[in-house]
């Protein structure tokens, strides 16, 4: 799989497209007198925006960019992002975090079942002592188990890795 970077124009175009889709969906709910669905949609958009804003506190430009653009670079994933970032992470770890995330996504992406919803939940927590990113992919794909050379700077705890769910925690102890 070839990975791509996005230009500023691409990012703005994707963001505008997503925004217009969200506005149209809210308008549709209101036209159908489904006010509660419209409110739920607004709340979901609000929470996602808060999470995207909160991850900037990581002070990891590559990781933040990766998280903010994953849906556009890998559109087969339905992403849910939750974050509680209260403390920045050591900038020296930025490249290693992105490398691991990118390799895990690439490992399954080309073998995703196009007829199955692929739900990716990413949760991020930081404090003075630790950075933890929980990666939980549910869907269907056909690939071998992921093997990655251990890195002393990041720890990965795999909870489940099958052809229907892949869940791991990537963590870094703060220095």
Image (cartoon, rainbow, N blue to C red):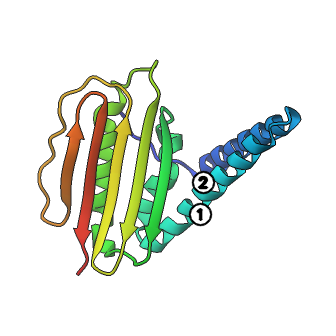
Q: Viewer-proximal residue, 141 or 74? A: 141
168 relative position to 68: left or right: left
Q: Residues within 10 Å of mark 1 (few under 14, many from 20)?
A: some
1 relative position to 15: left or right: left
- Residue behind mark 2: 8
- Residue behind mark 1: 50
Quadrant containing the C terminus is bottom left
Q: Decide: marks 1, 2 in contact (CB < 8 A)?
A: no
41 relative position to 174: left or right: right
Classify mark 1: helix, strand or loop: helix
Residue 169: image quadrant is bottom left
Q: Position of residue 27 (x, y in %)?
A: 83, 40
Q: Residue at x 39, y 40 (%)?
A: 3
Vertical relation: 161 (above or below) 144: below
Vertical relation: 58 (above or below) 156: below
Q: Viewer-proximal residue, 77 or 35? A: 35
Q: Residues within 10 Å of mark 2 (few under 14, many from 20)?
A: few
Per the model, the C-alpha gap separating discs 1 and 2 is 21 Å
Q: Viewer-proximal residue, 69 or 163? A: 163
């Amino acid at each position: 799989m070839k990975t791509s970077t996005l230009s500023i124009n691409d990012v703005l175009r994707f963001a505008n497209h997503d925004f217009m889709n969200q506005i149209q969906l809210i308008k549709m709910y209101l036209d159908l007198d489904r006010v509660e669905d419209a409110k739920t949609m607004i709340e979901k958009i609000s929470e996602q925006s808060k999470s995207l804003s909160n991850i900037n506190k990581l002070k990891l430009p590559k990781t933040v960019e990766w998280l903010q653009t994953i849906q556009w670079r890998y559109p087969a994933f339905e992403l849910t992002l939750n974050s509680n970032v209260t403390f920045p992470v050591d900038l020296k770890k930025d490249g290693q975090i992105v490398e691991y995330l990118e390799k895990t996504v690439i490992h399954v992406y080309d073998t995703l079942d196009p007829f199955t919803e692929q739900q990716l939940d990413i949760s991020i927590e930081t404090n003075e002592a630790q950075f933890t990113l929980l990666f939980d992919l549910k869907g269907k794909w056909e690939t071998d188990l992921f093997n990655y050379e251990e890195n002393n700077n990041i720890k990965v705890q795999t909870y489940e890795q099958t052809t229907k769910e892949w869940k791991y925690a990537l963590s870094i102890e703060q220095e």
